[in-house]
Image (cartoon, rainbow, N blue to C red):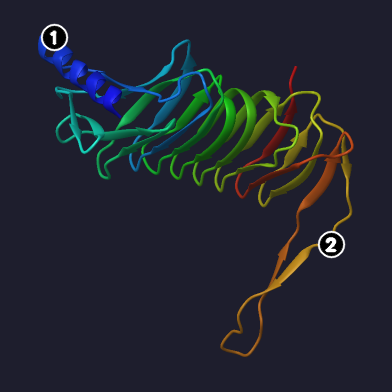
Amino acid sequence: MKTIKIIAALAVAMLINTGLQAQTAEQLVVPLSQPGKPYKLDVGLVDGSITVTTYEGKDIIIGVQEKGDKKVRVRTHDGMHSLSTGSRADIQAEENNNKVNVHGEAGKTTNLVIKIPQNEVALKLGTVNDGDILASNISGELEISNVNGGIKLTSIAGSVVANTVNGNVIVTFRSIDPKAPMAFTTLNGNVDVTFPTSLKANVKLKSDRGEIYTDFDVTAEPHKPNVTHTSRSKGGMYSLKLEDWVYGKIDGGGPEMLMKNMNGNIYIRKAK
């Protein structure tokens, strides 16, 4: 924590020396307690986008992109470090034993651009409004959630659980964890996932108002539709709901790969 305080103080001095430019994209540097070792990063916003890429460094670098005549300042409070632009952004970052939490204030749209070290990471990213979530060249375990925006993950090595409501879920793997189950879901949008040709998986698929496409050889498995009973209506009758999924195995089977949407198609692609 002490190291981060020093970095934040240096950032303030740099801002003073440069005169606080009107068009700014300042950075907050968060050192890890154990650089070079696996770490966790949790980023949560209510309004805004998140972009994460790796670089050849040992610190986490958080950039806030703002448009307009807004001044950026960095401050500390009780071991936490805030990068803010007055009424436009208020981002707090805290590091403890290689666990980093980054959060934004509700009601303020903020676009974060984050650079992270290349070593293995447990990455959790979430936003609600006004932005997409983008990540590339990440190795590790990814948990991604959005509501009103898309998710696009490229050149991923490891495992992914990705969910949004209004937007596409697009994921491209360069390699996967052969033992990890994964899930890719949206309500309104396409689910489009590209796997290595060596994929072994049990797939569980459902598209209510779309089609399912794949260039893998999938061995279909017979499965009885799941019928659920809802509460009794005023007329004394029960409502029955039929949930019909597609089950299958790719190359003999493996961990479960769940893909689901309502309005859109599902694509399970083989890497070229």
Q: Residues within 10 Å of mark 2 (few under 14, many from 20)?
A: few
Query: Tag 1: residue type?
Result: Thr
Q: Secondary structure at mark 2?
A: loop
Query: Tag 2: residue type?
Result: Lys
Q: Looking at the rendering, which quadrant does residue 194 occupy? A: top right
> What label does residue 9 carry, if any?
none
Q: Is residue 56 above or below residue 117?
A: above
Horizontally, is 150 left or right of 264 in the view? Answer: left
Kindly identify the residue that appears in the image at 80 percent across and 29 percent down.
215
The number of numbered badges drawn on the structure is 2
> What label does residue 18 carry, if any?
1
Q: Looking at the rendering, which quadrant does residue 237 occupy? A: bottom right
| Residue 44 x/y as whole percent | 39, 40
Kindly identify the residue that appears in the image at 51 percent across and 47 percent down.
165
Q: Is residue 73 above or below residue 222?
A: above
Counting residues from the start of the chain, the first of labels 1 and 2 encountered is: 1
Whether residue 3 is visible to the viewer of this picture, yes or no, is yes
| Residue 120 x/y as whole percent | 56, 25
Kindly identify the residue that appears in the image at 57 percent across and 45 percent down.
186
Horizontally, is 185 left or right of 149 in the view? Answer: right
Residue topped by disc 2? 224
